[in-house]
Image (cartoon, rainbow, N blue to C red):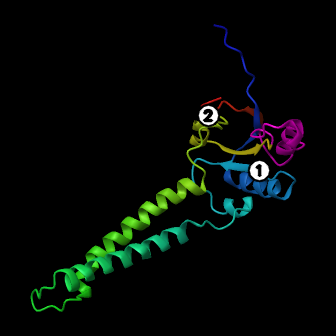
Amino acid sequence: MHKENKVPALSGVVGFFDDPESLTEAAAKVRDSNYKQFDCFTPYAVHGLEHAQGLPRSKIPYVTGVFAFTGTATAFAWQYAASATWWPHIIGGKPMNSLPAFVPIIFELSVLFGGIATFFGMLAFNRLPNLKKRAFDPSITNNRFAILIDNPNAEIEDEEEHVAFSPEQAEQFLKSVGAKDVRKVYNEGWFS
């Protein structure tokens, strides 16, 4: 059986930088240019890079807060119902609604609900797992700083919807903002 050789689609253009300062400066210039789909890769967190990229504030703290409060309310309601309504017993002379006795369970359910919501919120907001687009070697973030300018047409099937994108212009632009090494990146998706 003859297997057809497919040419992988151009995913984008990646430029490598020597240090976090030059990466941050370049990210601000890419943000201000006409390239709207780009991402930065670093071996460690770089302070101020999210501002240089123009990223909005994360919604994760709100998701965590809402679900942690839901855990707090659930724990209190559950314990109150159990100790004051379903099985009312006076233990050690404490009132039926003894808030100090409820604190450990309230804390545990708040942390549990908040932690699970944070995990699934991160997956949802980051659109993970991403099994279709595997742009380049994941070990890139071991010791290099890079900016990947995405090809906006990589995920579009219909030729009529394609946006003008020139990889050569993207390469020149990355070199002009200080990239030391620039390469084209091809999509080698897991399920191509």
Question: Looking at the image, which residue sits at the far front?
Answer: 86
Q: Is residue 60 left or right of residue 94?
A: right
**In the picture, residue 79 is in which quadrant?**
bottom left
Q: Which residue is mark 2?
A: 137
- Tell me the SS state at disc 2: loop
Is 47 or 41 nearer to us in this picture?
Answer: 41
View extreme (left): residue: 92
Percent coordinates x, y for residue 101 in the rendering: 22, 82
Tell me the kind of residue under disc 1.
Gln
Crowding around mark 2 (Cα neighbors within 10 Å: few <14, some 14 to 19, many 20+) is few
Which numbered disc flags the more N-terminal residue, 2 or 1? 1
Q: Nearer the viewer, residue 78 or 18?
A: 78
Q: Position of residue 87 (x, y in %)?
A: 16, 81
For residue 89: magenta? no
Residue 24: name its quadrant: bottom right
The correct choice, above or below, for 104 with respect to 29 in the image is: below
Judge by depth and name the residue closer to the eye, 91 or 119.
91
Please give the name of the residue rendered at 49% of the width and 68% of the height, measured from the top-left corner: 64
Q: Amino acid at mark 2?
A: Asp
Which segment did they paint magenta?
153-181
Residue at (67, 61) in percent of width and height = 50
Q: Which residue is mark 1?
A: 37
Q: At 28% from the left edge and 80% from the top edge, which residue is drawn? A: 103
